[in-house]
Image (tube, rainbow, N blue to C red):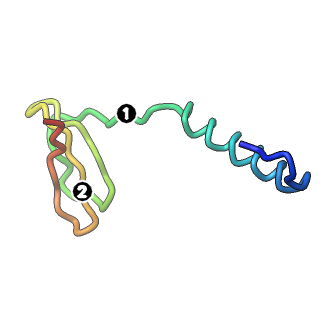
Amino acid sequence: MAYINQSPDLRVLFADLERRLRLLETATRFTFPAVTSDPSNPRIGDAWLNTTSNLAKIVDANGTVRVLNWT
């Protein structure tokens, strides 16, 4: 990623960015909480797996509950 004529400060900056990107790539995965029924008052950004209907759901920015569809 670094170029030969970069200043030392710029090389340090790029090294830090690369380190941070690698941390993101290896971050722990997120697992939806498993519930038997949908929450009664979900907030924007909430996500869950309804084990009764076997559907993953999320509340979008408008407050609408959406079913995640992977097909």
Q: Determine contact: label 2, label 1, CB under 8 Å.
A: no
The answer to whether residue 24 is left or right of residue 39 is right
Q: Residue furthest left?
A: 53
Q: Position of residue 53 (x, y in %)?
A: 8, 34
Q: Which residue is mark 1?
A: 31
Residue situated in front as seen by the camera: 38 or 58: 58
* Viewport quadrant of the N terminus: top right
The answer to whether 34 is drawn above or below residue 10 in the figure is above
Local packing at callout 1 (Cα closer than 10 Å; few below 14, some 14-19, many 20+) is: few
As helix, strand or loop, the secondary structure at mark 1 comes to loop
The answer to whether 4 is drawn above or below residue 62 in the figure is above
- What is the quadrant of residue 34 in the picture? top left
**Residue drawn 29% across and 60% down?**
43
- What is the quadrant of residue 24 in the picture? top right
The answer to whether 64 is drawn above or below residue 32 in the figure is below
Local packing at callout 2 (Cα closer than 10 Å; few below 14, some 14-19, many 20+) is: some
Q: Position of residue 13 (x, y in %)?
A: 79, 53
Q: Which mark is residue 59?
A: 2
Q: Position of residue 31 (x, y in %)?
A: 37, 33
Residue situated in front as seen by the camera: 52 or 47: 47
Instruction: Give the amino acid at mark 2.
Output: Val
Q: Earlier in the sequence, mark 2 or mark 1?
A: 1
* Viewport quadrant of the C terminus: top left
As helix, strand or loop, the secondary structure at mark 2 comes to strand
Instruction: Give the amino acid at mark 1.
Output: Thr
